[in-house]
Structure formats: C-alpha cells, structure tokens
Image (spheres, rainbow, N blue to C red):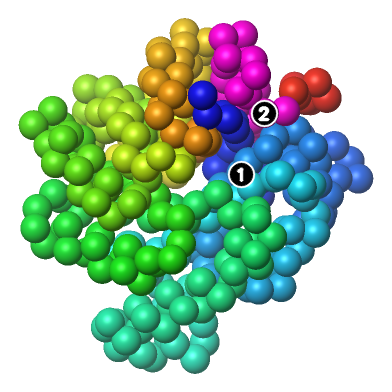
Amino acid sequence: MAEILVGTCSWTDRALVTSGWYPRGRRDAEGRLRYYAERFPVVEVDSAYYALPSVRTSRLWVERTPDGFVFDVKAFSLLTGHPTRPAALPADLRGHARDEGLLDEVWDRFAEAVEPLRRAGRLGTLLFQYPPSLAPGPGAEGIVRAARERARDWPFAVEFRHPGWWREERVRSTAALLADLDATAVAVDTVAGLPTSMPPVAPATTSRLSVVRFHGRSPHWGTGTKEDRFRHAYTEGELGEWLPRIRALADRTDRVHVLFNNCCADAAVRAARTMHDLLAATVPHQVRRQLNDYCR
C-alpha cells in the first residue's frame, strides 16, 4: 500500500497567515515554512500559478525543509490557458505576442526555477490545473498533450475544472488519455449539485502517484470571490466519505498526496489534521508523520 501524505495547498495564503496559526516569532518567510514543515510532510506551491518562481527561492525551500518533505508545484497560469495579466510575466516578456514561442520561453523559465526541487528529491509533481472553459474534446486533448510534451521529463498531474471530463460517460476515456500521457489524474472534492460541481471520481492513472485536492463545499463554487468559492470547514463525516477512495488509490499507487484548498483562515490546516487522524486510524503505517505538536 502507498505512503499517504496529507497537507495543504499553500503555506503562505494570507488568510492562513493572519489566522494566528503561525506563532509569534515564526511569521517571517523562513519561519512560516519551517513551522509548516514540522507539522506536515507535503505542500502545494500555489504561488507559482500567479508568478514564475525563481531558482533562488526553490533553493531556499529545500534548505528550510527536512529530508523527505515534498512540494507539488502548480503550473504558471499561462501554461494552462488561464487569463494571465501582463504584469504577471517577467518584464522582458510582457510585450511578447501570446503565441507558442512565448509558451516555450515561459515553460523553460518555469522548469529552470523548479529544477532545484527535483535535484534535491523534493518535487512531488507539477500540477497542471485547467480552467472550466476547457471542455472535453479533441482540441482540448491536444492542448493537454502539448503541455505534456513540454513537460515530458517531469512528473505531471492534471486537474480538470470542467465536470464533463469526469462524467460517467467519459470517465474511461479521460482516464485512458491521462494514463497514455503518464499523467496523474487529480481527484477533487467540491460541493455537489451545481452545474460546475466536479464528480468525486478518483482514478489511478499512474503507478507512481495519486493526488486528491479538497476545495471545500461552498455553494458558491464556480462563482463569486475566492473567499466565497473556498470557504468551508470540513466535518469528519464529509472527510470520511473519501476514506474508501483514498485507500483504493493507495492500493494502486506508490504514494498518495491529500491536499486541502479550503483556504479561509486556518480551515485547511484543521481539515488536514482531521484527515490525517482519520487515515491513521485505518492505515497507520501508511500515513507519514504524526502531528503531535500541531497547534489547533
């Protein structure tokens, strides 16, 4: 059975920083990451979606975390077809045409920045999260294949935000596409019953890694502000619904990352602790790192 690592989708989110979860004396950039890494074994770098990271920053992440700690890195927005403000691009690229040449250059810089994590054995996967506008079809499959070709030498995970990819009639074909690309399918938890709700499907498409991301169950999923979309405090019962799916993934892959993105105040770290405890009660030898010093 796989090793199961539980964490959150950010350690720098402003709502978490201002929630009081980080104690005094541990609220600077170095202190926050060291404090987080003492309590969780995995984290997602969601800031890389908003701006390209730097080689120096990646090296600091390695230095400030213990051996065995891993980072999943979210792909820069331009690489996944999301709207990208010119100001988010490096200054010398802001006047460049939005074409394949720009995508190639952005990918090269993104890969160079993340390379220190890979060299240190700290990279879990790159996460390519596609926008809700990417509906399933041949054109969309071509976009994903092109991204995979750029990242052909990297661990590669795909999260779709259009629910059509994982509706019952397409589950097999979507899973087959990702398996063919050696890409990890990212399972997600969202509120049910909305046109934008994602089916709670959790296929294992690589033997290397499975990823589950919990976005909360806000009724404003897909609409409203970031706070509206992700505001949710998970209950034990809601998390318990996922235990059979996570155990099934653990039976089919070498490692499972369970990450919480309900990023309002300290809701994500509290949910991660609860999920860790639930998993530890059923698969204790597979859940990495006891969180004995966790601060509620």
Quarter of the figure with residue 249: top left
Would you call the spot at circle 2 few (<14 residues within 10 Å), some (14-19), or many (20 or more)? some
Q: Position of residue 147 (x, y in %)?
A: 31, 66
Label drawn at residue 43: 1
Residue positioned 33% across, 52% down in the render? 182
Count of labels shown?
A: 2
Up-down relation of residue 141 to residue 88 (above or below):
above
Looking at the rendered structure, the kind of residue marked 1 is: Val
Of the residues under marks 1 and 2, which one precedes in the sequence? 1
Residue under the point 91% across and 45% down: 25
- The residue wearing badge 2 is 288
Instruction: Give whichever of 149, 269 is nearer the camera.
Output: 149
Instruction: Please name the residue shown 64% across and 15% down the image.
Output: 284
- Mark 1, secondary structure of its residue: strand
Question: Badge 1 local density, few (<14 within 10 Å), some, or many (20+)?
Answer: many
Q: Nearer the viewer, residue 236 or 62?
A: 62
- Above or below 258: residue 93: below
**What SS does tag 2 mark?**
loop
